[in-house]
Amino acid sequence: MNRTTPVIPQEEIARQRAYCAEIRALNARLERAPAAYVDTYGCQQNEADSELLRGMLAEMGYEIVDTDRDADVIVINTCAIREHAEQRVLGNVGALVHGKRRKPEQIICLCGCMAREQHVADKLRQSYRHVDLVFGPQVLWRFPELLRRVITRRGRVFETGDVPGAIAEGLPVRRSGRVKAWVSIMYGCNNFCTYCIVPYVRGRERSREPEAILAEIRQLVEEGYKDITLLGQNVNSYGKDLGEGVDFPDLLERAAAIPGDFLLRFMTSHPKDATEKLFDVMARCEKVAPVIHLPFQSGNSRVLSAMNRRYTREQYLEKVRALRARIPDVVLTSDVIVGFPGETTEEFEDTLSLIQEVRFDALFTFIYSPRKGTPAAQLPDPMSKEEKSANFDRLVEEQNRISLEKHQAYIGTVQRCLVDGLSDDPRNNLNARTPGGRLVHLSGDPALVGQFVDVEIVDCSTWALFGEKR
Ligand code: 5AD
Ligand code: SF4
């Protein structure tokens, strides 16, 4: 067997659970259960990691609360993808010093992608002395041990070094909802796009065993979950490290064969690895939602090459054609970066024309943010901020027009939607999703949450559809 992914031995996981029991015994001596708050920044992978953190904290006897006010343990799960996100985190972590003055025994932890950046770790060590525990994503499974070390020694703990990533199975999890669930199928990234920090902070790609993933999905379906998203930085690389001959389309097809009324989604797909085999499985399996998030990043082949994306504009468009040939009404969403170092306005025009040609249902637009340690951060970047912003605004405006037109085309159709939550709007008290994941507002019995219902679409905005239950 040529499996290269290290799996944490079950004895190690049992050791972590024993630390949970130890902390639980300490907490049981208190008058009331202590409170723990986990705050999450960034992507769905972080949301999924936070559900593990909450699971571990609950096992340690903490009550999980939704505010940092007066919490006994605060965990900030951070994102490093752009400067702006980092500044927000640092500002918010800085402000926690006031709460801690009132409550000196409070324990403040920072984890996630920022914890793996040397300059952040140094700053926290020197200037954020109220932060007690800092640890990276690769050692998340050791959280009970690390927290115990802080509690018993009352010293600061930094576990921010570069350790090879592994797979940890069997940690407790506390999920945030009863309808939608995340299932991580792999961790890390091997792609090294020149702008991106993820490979440096989350390490190399490693896949969970298919049997462990399928068992988790089966259990979720039994528990009544209806909308299950398979997660990975690049799900299309799934299985390459397993040496078992299982790839992502195989896994998806096996997951879709699990009995029950539910939908499967997945993210994120790198276009270079999104194959016709994947599109065939999507078309063939009714339980696979007709939607794909396929980040293109730029519409210009020179910029794509400088980004190390390993596909050209034409190749991207060809993938979209192959996908739409199989699933004509597939919902297509994407990410794009404006202002990559050296991108000219003519090159930006290619991005604009690509979105006009593809007509994405929704687009996540970002202005390039230099990340320390990535190759792109070394490139000359002559375009002014103002010019980049002007290009960005043009792109957003064009996409808003397209999104609105796409939504208008839903009016008069009937969609089988999953009611996935309540909204604050008294006229449209329910939120639902079309099979392709578009947001629908409607009114109805709150008991419908968690059910599929037929909804006639009667109105829309750029961002959402409005419907009536049939
Ligand atoms: N600057 C701006 N956007 C970035 N992204 C990743 N790295 C950067 C960066 N340095 C965007 C990409 C990616 C999405 C998650 O974030 O578009 O697909
Ligand atoms: Fe942010 Fe990327 Fe880390 Fe997700 S994996 S939290 S997007 S840096």
Image (cartoon, helix red, strand yellow):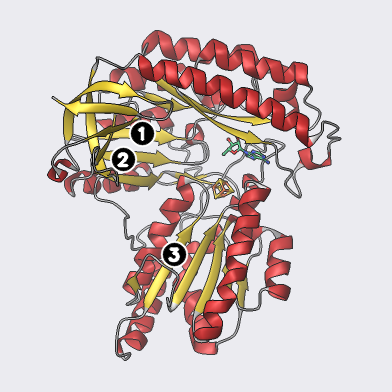
Crowd rating for badge 3 (residues with CA inside 10 Å; few <14, some 14–19, many 20+) = many
Q: Is residue 141 left or right of residue 14?
A: right
Identified at 78% across, 40% down, the residue is 375
* Residue 228 versus residue 303 in the image, above or below: below
**Along the polypeptide, which appears first: circle 2 or circle 3?**
3
Report the disc number at residue 38: 3
The part of the image, by quadrant, that contains residue 315 is top right
In the rendered image, which residue does mark 2 sit on? 228
In the rendered image, which residue does mark 1 sit on? 265
Q: Is label 1 in a helix, a strand or a loop?
A: strand
Marks 1/2: CA distance? 6 Å
**Along the polypeptide, which appears first: circle 1 or circle 3?**
3
Q: Is label 2 in a helix, a strand or a loop?
A: strand
- Residue 27 visible from this viewpoint: yes
Q: Position of residue 313 (x, y in %)?
A: 64, 15
The part of the image, by quadrant, that contains residue 308 is top right
Q: Nearer the viewer, mark 1 or mark 3?
A: 3
- Which of the pair 67/126 is nearer the observer? 67
Q: Give the residue type that dot 3 points to.
A: Val
Q: Give the residue type that dot 2 points to.
A: Ile
Question: For the residue with label 2, is its CB less than 8 Å from the closest atom of ligand 2?
Answer: no
